[in-house]
Amino acid sequence: MLEAREITVNYGLREAVTDLSLFAEPHQITAVVGPNGAGKSTLLRALNGAVSLARGEVLLDGTSLNSYARRAVSRHIAVVAQEADLRFPVTVIEFVLGGRYAWANAGAWGWETERDVAIARVVLRETELQDLDSRLMNELSGGERQRAVLARALATEAGVFLLDEPTANLDLSHQATMMRLVRNRCDEQGASAVVVTHDINLAAQFADQVLLLKGGRALAKGSPREVLTSRLLHDIFDLQVLVDAHPTTGAPRITPVH
Amino acid sequence: MTRRLRFQQRRATPGRTLAICFALLLALFCVMLAAAVIGSESLPVSAALRAVLTGGKSASGLTAEQRAILMDIRLPRILLAAAVGMSLAAAGAGYQALLRNPLAEPYLLGISNGAAVGTMTALVFLGGHEWSRPVMAFAGALVATMVVYRLALGRTGTSPERLILAGVIVTTFLSSAIVFITTLMDATRIRSFTFWLLGDLSGTTTSLLAVALISAVVGALVLAMNARSLNLLMLGERDAFDLGVEVGRVRLTVFVAASLLVGASVASSGSVGYVGLVVPHLVRLSFGSDNRLVIPAAALAGALFVIVADTVARTIIAPRELPVGAITALIGAPLFIYLLKRGR
C-alpha cells in the first residue's frame, strides 16, 4: 500500500510537483493524466523514492519510504519506465530475470534460484514472449521490448506497480493485453497500480481512479466518470473535447473536437 | 524446444561459468608452459614442466643456465603478464558495464595515465621506495577515474560521447604531466621510461610481482561479486535503482576495485593498452553479456592474451625486444576495427 502525503518536489527553483496527495489502494488502478510537463513522471519517481522531497512524505505500508533499504523498496514497488537503454547484447530471459535482483541471496554470488527462473517463465508466458526468451533484446520490435519491460516488472512480485506510458509503443491488441495483465494483478493479488498515460480512453476504460494534473498540482481526482468531463479536460488541455458513453462498456469516451 | 542457439545467447549459470573458466584455465596453463620454453634459448618441455611444478627443486634435464633462465627470468615475467592481463581485462569489463559503454577502457579513459603519473611521482619525488609505487599508482588511477566520471556526468547521466571526450581530456592533460615529470629525470633513465610507458614486462621485482598478482585476484573477485549489480547497471542507472541496486555503493566499489587493478598493473609494467577493450569484447561476443560470466572469463582470457603478446614481443625481433604494449595495440586495434565492422 503506497501513499503520498502532500508531497512537493523541486527541480532547481521550479516546483515540479506541488502539495500532491495520492493513495494507491489495493485492487485499484490509478491513472495520472495531464499535459506534457505537468509533473506526471516526477510524481512516479517521487513515489518510488528516486527523487528527494522538498515537503511531505511517501508511505509504504504506513512507514516512510526513506526508512526502507533500497532492495526492500524494490520488492514492494515495481517500475515500468519507457524504453530500456540497450548497448550490450542481453537476451530476453536475462533481462526479465533482472526483476528478481531484489530477492537475491547475498551468499550465492547473485545466481538466480530455480524459483526465480520459474517465475520468469510464467511472466514470459503472460506477456506472450515465451518463444522469444533467448532472443537478444535489441533484435525485438519496440512493442516486444515494451512487453519485456512489463514482464520484468511482473517478475518482481511487487504489490505496487508504477507505470510510465506503458502502452506507448504497443498496437491495439497488445495495449489491451498489457492493461489486462495489470488489471489481473490488481484483481487477483490485491496489487495497486499507478499509470501515467496520454491515452485518456485507455485510462477511462481501465482505471478505477483518475488524477488530473496540471502544472504539478492536482486539478481533480475521482472515478473516470466524475473526472473525465469535457469541462475539466478543457481546463487541462485547452482543447474542446466531446465526452459520451462507450456503447458497450459505458465508460466515458473522449473525442477531441478540432 | 529444439531451436539451436548461438553460444552467446545461452543463459549464464554457475555450471556453465565454471565449465568455461575451467577450459580457459587449462588453455592458460598450456600457454604459460609454451611461453616458458619458447625464446632465444629453447628449453625441453618435460624438463621445464618438472622444474616449474617442483618450484625449481628438480632441475634434471636442464643446465644451470637454463634453470636460471626459466626460474628467474621467464617465469616471473609470465606471471607478471598474467597478472597484468587479468587486471586490465577485468577492469575493462567493470568500467564498460558501469559506464554503459563498450568502448570504456583503462587506457583510453586516461586511467592508466593517472596510474602512470602516480608511479612516476613516487619514483621522482618519493625516492622510488618500492611500496610507494603501487600505492601512488592506485591513488592516481582512482583520482583519474573520479575525474573522468565527473566530467562525463551530464544532467541525465553519462552519455557515451561525453565519456570518450572526458577520457581524451584527462589523457592529454596527464600526458603533459608525464612529459613534465620526465624532463625532471636524468637522461640515462629516460629511455627505459619511454619503454615502461608503452608497457614493458621486463623490469619487475619480486615484491611488485607479488603486489600485481594479489591485486589482480582480489580486484577481479570484488568485481565478480558485484557482477549481478553490474548486469543491471549495464541497462542504465535508473533501471538499476528501480530494481534495487544501491547504485552509489556499487559504483564506488567498482571504481576502487578497478583502480586497484589498473594501479597495480601500471606500477609494475606501465600502460599496456587495448587489453581491457579487446578481451571483454571477445568474451561477450562468444559467451554473452552476463557479467557473472564475463568478468572471470575476461580475467583468464586477458592473462592468456598478454602472455601470448609478450612472448611475441620478446621473440619477434630477437635478441632485441619490443614493449608488450606495442604488440597488444598492434593486435588490438585492427581486431577492434574488425569487430566494429562486423557489427555488434
Image (cartoon, grey):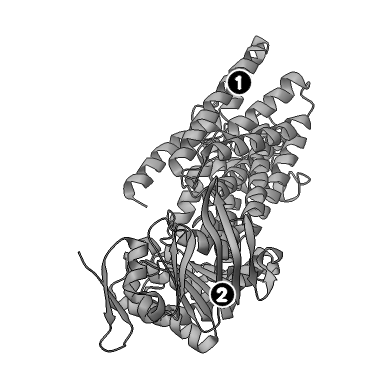
**Location of residue A40 in the rendering, given as x and y in whole percent from the top left corner:** 46, 62
Q: Determine which residue is flagged by label 1.
A: B177
Q: What is the quadrant of residue A49 in the picture?
A: bottom right
Q: Are the residues flagged by discs 1 and 2 from a single subunit? A: no
Where's the N terminus of chain A, which quadrant? bottom right
| B168 over B190 or under it: above or below | below
In 3D space, how far apart are the residues under numbered discs 1 and 2 (Cα atoms)?
58 Å
**Location of residue A28 in the rendering, given as x and y in whole percent from the top left corner:** 50, 81
Query: Toward the viewer: B95 or B72?
Result: B95
| B281 over B212 or under it: above or below | below
**What amino acid type should be assigned to the residue bearing mark 2?**
Phe
Q: What chain is tagged by disc 2?
A: A
Q: Is residue B265 left or right of residue B317?
A: right
Comparing labels 1 and 2, the label whose residue is closer to the camera:
2
- Identify which residue is drawn at 67% across, 13% down: B185
Query: Toward the viewer: A89 or A16?
Result: A16
User: Residue A29: in sight, yes or no?
Assistant: yes
- Identify which residue is drawn at 75% across, 41% down: B210
Tell me if mark 2 has few (under 14), some (14-19) or many (20+) residues whose alpha carbon lies within 10 angstroms of its own. some
| A134 over B256 or under it: above or below | below
Q: What chain is tagged by disc 1?
A: B
Where's the C terminus of chain A, which quadrant? bottom left
Tell me if mark 1 has few (under 14), some (14-19) or many (20+) residues whose alpha carbon lies within 10 angstroms of its own. some
Q: What is the quadrant of residue A235 in the picture?
A: bottom left
**Location of residue B83 in the rendering, given as x and y in whole percent from the top left corner:** 65, 43
Q: Determine which residue is flagged by label 2.
A: A23
Q: In this view, does B38 lie to the left or right of A80?
A: right
- Helix, strand, or loop for circle 1? helix
Q: Please give the label number shown on residue B330.
A: none
- Helix, strand, or loop for circle 2? strand
